[in-house]
Amino acid sequence: MATTLQTQTVMTESVRNGREAPKEQEGRTGWLRAIAPLWPLGVARILYGYLWWQQSGWKVPSDDFGRKSGGGLWYWVHQEIQYPTLAAYKNFLVNVMIPHWTFFGWMTLITETFIATTLILGLGTRLGSVVAIGMAANITIGILNVPHEWGWTYTMLIMFPALFLLTDAGRSFGLDAFVAPRLDRAAAAGNSLARLVRWLV
């Protein structure tokens, strides 16, 4: 009797581990919900965040973001003006950004630093990802027609935060792993603010 019980227990554990229940496992997976480890996305998120941190490093306020030296952000914006992808975007750069250069320089630095911080720490990962998608799309529109720029670089710049947005990338090697469960419990208890904030992590 003990042997039978042991066998049933082992078989039950096997079913739970998915070794004896391919139909059950198939039901939980599939083309759109395949099960995969989360840590590769966590590593990719940190590296992608560091990319933005590195890029923010050459937005230098003391140089007025390149206007004094003719380099940095000033140089690249003028490349976008010289080789426009869209006429409307060129008009925005010439008529809005250039006349208010220092303001937009600071906005660029703050935005890129925010993206880097949220993704490296894995804190508010979905919010950081949304901002990264917007910033990457903005860069792509501006620079796509500049000579010697490879369009697929900017496709990947948009693609990575889209992946982080659609997954719980901040819950691997990230602070969202500690924040999200607390928000889930509060949301389940009827806290509307927690439910809203949960969408950001």
Image: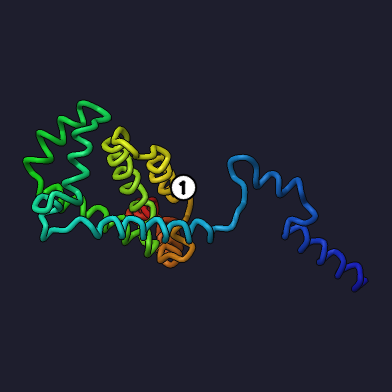
Residue 71 against residue 30 in the figure, above or below: below
Residue 59's spot in the image, x, y percent? 20, 55
Three-letter code, disc 1: Leu
Q: In which quadrant of the rendered image does the N terminus lie?
A: bottom right
Residue 102's spot in the image, x, y percent? 9, 50
Q: Which residue lies at the image location 40% right of the left edge and 66% below the top edge?
A: 175
- Side of 51 where 113 appears, left or right: left
Res. 142 image quadrant = top left
Q: In which quadrant of the rendered image does the C terminus lie?
A: bottom left
Residue 62's spot in the image, x, y percent? 10, 60
Q: How many numbered discs sit on the rendered protein? A: 1
Res. 80 image quadrant = top left
Q: Which residue lies at the image location 18% right of the left edge and 45% below the top edge?
A: 75
Residue 6's spot in the image, x, y percent? 86, 70
Q: Can you name the residue that lies furthest to the bottom here?
A: 2
- Side of 154 where 30 appears, left or right: right
Q: 52 or 60, which lies in front?
A: 60
Q: Which residue lies at the image location 58% right of the left edge and 41% below the top edge?
A: 32
How crowded is the residue under tag 1: few (<14 C-alpha within 10 Å), some, or many (20+)?
A: some
Q: Which residue is mark 1?
A: 163
Q: Which residue lies at the image location 34% right of the left edge and 39% below the top edge?
A: 148
Q: 155 or 197, which lies in front?
A: 155
- Side of 126 where 17 appears, left or right: right
SS at circle 1: helix
Res. 145 image quadrant = top left
Q: Can you name the residue that lies furthest to the left here?
A: 99
Q: 85 or 196, which lies in front?
A: 85
